């Protein structure tokens, strides 16, 4: 490609882009004046309280879920099942085998939860919440949204179960965290509901009789099973546990659950210096589905949120390059389009599906998919390293959207190490220190490719 | 916006200073509107909605603005770009996009040679509304810094120095990024226009 052609491309792109300037609206001055007042008020309202998080009301989200075709289908199935329940059960005593069967047939659910966690009689605020909304689709994932009393979102935890990954988004800090789940944690998540079903089927429970809860006539049972695992964002193991489940006598679907437990699970006691915790939780407003749209469980992380580093994470240059190498192994030579971790996860997940097919996470290739996913997660070091370069104002630039492993001599990433010197990572992941003039030469050569 | 003004506003935002917010708003409300309008078109209600969502979201998070993550413009445009992407995800736009893609497929000629400037693009193609739709879609899929660079360079005719100031990098990096942005735009346009075949 000649320099002449280069100019022509420049001209062509210029004329194409110019087209977007036609048919546009000049700024609406009156609207912008009104918005100035409105946004200023919003700014001041959020500046007076530094802890004011983004306000998200759970109910509209629920409406969005119901708009999805799969959820509608599932809701229809729920209604059909409920009608069957009415015709078969009438006013008779609840058949608990039927309850277990319904929970197996409609394992996906959404419910609200309120929990109080105490240690030595004192409430632990950051573990307690009056308002938690949980979406759970066994084998696929979960999403737990914690709200404060005003309906502000405090924290959102996503579990991508086949990918053994947990993502915690903390709007108040505008940060997010990504962790791999251990096999134990994973099995705990997947075993929560089946263990409840097992307990019901075993018949080893105490009947509690009937009671009206929120206007619904219910019948309950209670059982103790310290091995029961309830997913509370993280799978917590309990030392002692009393579990009560209340089902609608007309439909046989569970509508209310109560838990009283003590735990010395290290995940919790790390906050209490090893002291045991007491947990009281109620789960209510259950909606049971055969299936829910998995898209509801996909992480949504705003672009400007910052990835949090764990102590175990390293993000020096060497690890950053290893992260790129690992990612390119998954994608067979392509690097992440950009070094924003949520995008890396999406690109990585798509690459795995492309490589192993739609059944990558459930079929025989599951182990291989997991291994490839671990490679994708390695790129976290690269993202953290790049973030650090930006933080230190090192004039860092990354070109993963146009450079692949085949572009051996093309600049993939660069950052300033002194006034005239740059550190450069090439497409083949070799590194070099070069001057600004040499860099301009390299870039010129690349743009003519 | 020069560096010291940028610093003052950033500090003010972190302290909840009303004047800092107003300075930011006065400096960027119209440029944000213009760029959104270029990406969305003449649907003034949609442009107003996106501008409003952008500034309200910015107002809510301004106190947490971190200068080390980029300039005020980069931060603001990151929010705006997300709103534009949400707009394009809405179902009703798919019909218009699908029609534009069909139009592109039906054109005779070596279309990608036009993109690579190996052949002339007919004037009626260059002036067509369908091309505008496809260019907007391709642009909307680019990273925020590439959008800023391409719009600033090719529509606002800004100098490399001025662009460097807006996005907070050196002129060397601007030139380098521009070459990438052009390449990324061509790639995005080819992808969005040729996906007709799969549509």
Image (spheres, coloured by chain):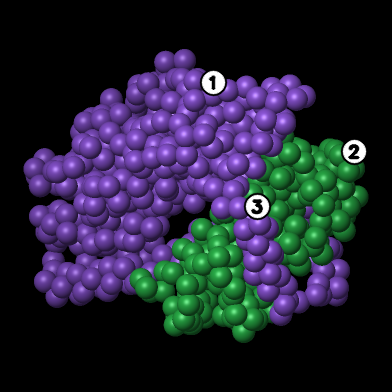
Chain colours: A purple, B green
Quarter of the view holding residue A109? bottom left
**Residue at 75% over, 65% down:** B155
Is B161 drawn above or below residue A271 in the view shown? below
- Mark 2, mark 3: which one is toward the viewer? 3
Q: Are marks 2 and 3 in contact (CB under 8 Å)?
A: no
Task: State whether residue B1 appears in this view.
Answer: yes
Report the chain holding disc 2.
Answer: B
x, y percent for residue A151 = 57, 53
Q: Chain of mark 1?
A: A
- Please give the chain letter of the residue carrying mark 3: A
- Please report whichever mark, 3 or 1, sits nearer to the chain's N-terminal start: 3
For label 2, the crowd category at 10 Å Cα-Cα, with few meaning under 14, some 14 to 19 and many 20 or more, is few
Query: In the image, which disc is placed on residue B4?
Result: 2
Residue that carries the numbered disc 1 in the rendered image: A316
Q: Residue furthest top?
A: A273
Number of marks drawn: 3
Q: Tell me: residue B110, above or below residue A161.
A: below
- Judged left or right of residue A340, residue B50 is right
Q: CA distance from mark 2 to mark 1?
A: 31 Å
Question: Foreground mark, 3 or 1?
Answer: 3
Provide the residue designation for mark 3: A3
What x and y, as percent, mark residue A195? 18, 41
Q: In terms of depth relative to the viewer, which is nearer, A362 or A392?
A: A392
Element type at marker 3?
Answer: helix
Q: Residue at x 56, y 70 (%)?
A: B119
């Amino acid at each position: 490609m000649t320099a002449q052609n280069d100019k022509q491309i420049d001209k062509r792109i210029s004329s194409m882009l110019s087209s977007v300037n036609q048919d546009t609206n000049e700024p609406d001055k009156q609207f912008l004046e009104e918005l100035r007042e409105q946004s200023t008020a919003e700014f001041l309202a959020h500046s007076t309280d530094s802890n004011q998080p983004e306000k998200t009301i759970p109910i509209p989200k629920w409406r969005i879920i119901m708009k999805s075709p799969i959820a509608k289908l599932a809701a229809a199935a729920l209604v059909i099942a409920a009608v069957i329940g009415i015709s078969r059960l009438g006013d008779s005593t609840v058949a608990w085998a039927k309850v277990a069967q319904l929970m197996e047939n409609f394992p996906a659910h959404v419910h609200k939860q309120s929990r109080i966690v105490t240690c030595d009689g004192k409430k632990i605020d950051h573990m307690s919440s009056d308002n938690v909304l949980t979406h759970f689709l066994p084998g696929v994932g979960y999403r737990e949204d914690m709200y404060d009393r005003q309906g502000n979102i405090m924290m959102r935890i996503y579990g991508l179960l086949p990918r053994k990954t947990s993502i915690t988004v903390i709007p108040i800090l505008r940060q997010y965290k990504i962790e791999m789940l251990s096999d134990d944690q994973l099995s705990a998540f997947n075993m929560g509901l089946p263990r409840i079903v097992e307990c019901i089927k075993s018949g080893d429970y105490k009947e509690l009789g009937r009671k009206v809860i929120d206007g619904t006539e219910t019948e309950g049972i209670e059982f103790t099973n310290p091995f029961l695992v309830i997913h509370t964002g993280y799978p917590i193991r309990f030392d002692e546990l009393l579990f009560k489940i209340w089902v609608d006598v007309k439909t046989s679907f569970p509508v209310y659950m109560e838990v009283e437990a003590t735990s010395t699970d290290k995940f919790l006691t790390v906050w209490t210096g090893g002291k045991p915790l007491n947990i009281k939780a109620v789960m209510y407003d259950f909606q049971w589905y055969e299936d829910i749209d998995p898209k509801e469980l996909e992480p949504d992380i705003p672009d400007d949120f910052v990835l949090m580093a764990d102590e175990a994470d390293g993000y020096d240059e060497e690890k950053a390059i290893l992260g790129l190498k690992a990612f390119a192994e998954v994608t067979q030579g392509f690097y992440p389009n950009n070094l924003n971790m949520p995008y890396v996860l999406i690109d990585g997940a798509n690459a795995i599906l492309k490589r192993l097919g739609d059944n990558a996470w459930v079929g025989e290739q599951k182990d291989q998919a997991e291994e490839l996913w671990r490679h994708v997660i390695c790129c976290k070091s690269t993202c953290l390293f790049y973030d650090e370069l930006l933080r230190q104002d090192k004039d860092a630039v990354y070109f993963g959207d146009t450079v692949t492993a085949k572009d051996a001599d093309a600049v993939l990433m660069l950052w300033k190490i002194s006034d005239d010197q740059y550190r450069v990572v090439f497409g083949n992941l070799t590194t070099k220190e070069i001057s600004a003039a040499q860099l301009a030469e390299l870039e010129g050569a690349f743009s003519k490719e | 916006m020069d560096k010291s003004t940028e610093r003052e506003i950033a500090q003010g935002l972190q302290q909840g200073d009303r004047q800092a917010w107003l300075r930011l708003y006065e400096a960027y409300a119209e440029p944000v509107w213009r760029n959104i309008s270029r990406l969305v078109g003449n649907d003034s209600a949609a442009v107003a909605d996106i501008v409003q969502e952008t500034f309200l979201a910015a107002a809510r998070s301004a106190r947490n603005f971190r200068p080390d993550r980029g300039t005020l413009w980069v931060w603001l445009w990151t929010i705006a770009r997300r709103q534009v992407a949400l707009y394009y995800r809405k179902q009703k736009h798919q019909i218009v996009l699908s029609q534009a893609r069909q139009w592109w497929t039906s054109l005779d000629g070596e279309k990608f040679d036009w993109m690579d400037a190996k052949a002339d693009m007919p004037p009626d193609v260059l002036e067509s509304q369908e091309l505008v739709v496809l260019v907007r879609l391709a642009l909307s899929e680019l990273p925020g810094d590439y959008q800023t660079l391409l719009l600033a360079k090719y529509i606002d005719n800004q100098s490399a120095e001025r662009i460097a100031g807006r996005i907070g990098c050196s002129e060397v990096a601007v030139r380098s990024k521009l070459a990438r942005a052009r390449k990324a735009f061509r790639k995005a346009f080819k992808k969005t226009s040729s996906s007709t075949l799969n549509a």
